[in-house]
């Protein structure tokens, strides 16, 4: 891997998988609170819960409450499924991907 590729990969990892414009479209579709949006961005960058609570200066309980509400809103049961829903929402660009699955 050359230096330019390594730099691009480092930048992409630091910023997460989407740019600000792409995140805006995702957030408009998913209708998450501002704090949930910040949490989701950090999750998408691969940060663990401990890193997220440190970064956002919140308690672990508060983080779990926000994450649980995101799971319920999007009809998912874990972090991997949540992030997959985000990626599918971005790829599709439609509101159907953000809807809850029938149970």
Image (cartoon, rainbow, N blue to C red):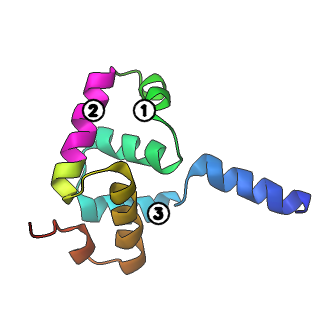
The furthest residue to the left: 103
Report the Cα–Cα distance between label 3 and label 2.
Answer: 27 Å
Residue 5 to residue 77: above or below? below
Q: Quadrant of residue 95?
A: bottom left
Magenta span of residues? 59-70
Earlier in the chain: of badge 3 and badge 2, it is 3
| CB-based contact (under 8 Å), mark 2 and mark 1 | yes
Q: Which residue is mark 3?
A: 21
- Disc 1 crowd rating (10 Å Cα; few below 14, some 14-19, many 20+) is some
The location of residue 81, given as percent across then percent down, is: 34, 59
Q: Secondary structure at mark 2?
A: helix
Earlier in the chain: of badge 1 and badge 3, it is 3
Q: Which residue is mark 2?
A: 64
Q: Which residue is mark 1?
A: 49
Question: At 63% across and 51% down in the image, what residue appears?
Answer: 13
Membership of 69 in magenta stretch? yes
């Amino acid at each position: 891997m050359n230096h330019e590729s390594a730099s691009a990969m480092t930048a992409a990892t630091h910023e997460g998988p989407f740019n600000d414009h792409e995140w805006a479209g995702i957030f408009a579709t998913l209708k998450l609170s501002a704090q949930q949006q910040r949490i989701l961005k950090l999750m998408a960058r691969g940060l663990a819960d401990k890193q997220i609570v440190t970064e956002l200066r919140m308690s672990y309980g508060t983080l779990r409450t926000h994450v649980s509400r995101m799971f319920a809103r999007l009809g998912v049961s874990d972090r991997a499924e949540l992030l997959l829903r985000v990626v599918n929402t971005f790829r599709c660009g439609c509101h159907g991907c953000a809807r809850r699955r029938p149970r």
